[in-house]
Image (cartoon, grey):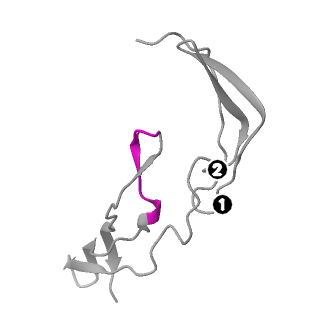
Amino acid sequence: AGGNVNEYSYTLEYNYYKDEETTADFATTTVLTVDGEKVTLPFKAGAYYNLPKVDGSFFNVLDFGLNAGMSLYLNRSLFVGARFTYGLADVTNNDYDYSQLELDGNNQRIPRADTDRNLSIQTSVGFSF
């Protein structure tokens, strides 16, 4: 087990889909001691400062899938329905896929080729006239 670390708070304010990656400002730093080792943290860090610069959009342009649905009419005007959608395409750019759990031997991010698909279950209640 490791030693005690003084309480330290760090607030990140960013918009996940809109903010551009920025750098960390190491001109002003905070130093913490963790297990006898000094760790230097930037006083100010922009969103995604530790991510590599990647060209292109996070999402792929094209998405397609399978749809199935049904409606049950309870009487002439009232119905309930359900739809299921299963995406067949990878919706994210693989250039952005990195392991979130571990780093390689050089302390660098490990690239992945995840397949991220849409999955949707929808229900509805409606009136027909």
> Residue 97 colored magenta?
yes
- What's the residue at 24%, 79% (across, down)? 66
Q: Residue furthest bottom?
A: 129
Q: Which residue is mark 1?
A: 20
- What's the residue at 32%, 71% (across, down)? 124
Q: Could you tell me which quadrant the N terminus lies in?
A: top left
Query: Distance between the Cα atoms at labels 1 and 2?
Result: 7 Å
The image quadrant that residue 118 belongs to is bottom left
For the residues bearing labels 1 and 2, Cβ distance under 8 angstroms: yes
Q: Nearer the viewer, residue 26 or 6?
A: 26
Disc 1 secondary structure class: loop
Q: Could you tell me which quadrant the C terminus lies in?
A: bottom left
Tell me where the magenta segment starts and ends, as one range. Answer: 95-106
Identity, as a three-letter code, of the amino acid under mark 2: Ala
Q: Which residue is mark 2?
A: 47
Question: Residue 3: horizontal and vertical position, in percent?
Answer: 50, 10
Identity, as a three-letter code, of the amino acid under mark 1: Glu
Q: Nearer the viewer, residue 21 or 91?
A: 21
> Residue 39 colored magenta?
no
Rendered view: 31 above or below 11: above
Q: Residue furthest right?
A: 27
Q: Nearer the viewer, residue 23 or 76?
A: 23
Label 1: how many Cα within 10 Å (few below 14, some 14–19, many 20+): few
Label 2: how many Cα within 10 Å (few below 14, some 14–19, many 20+): some
Q: Nearer the viewer, residue 90 or 103?
A: 103
Numbered mark located on residue 49 in the image: none
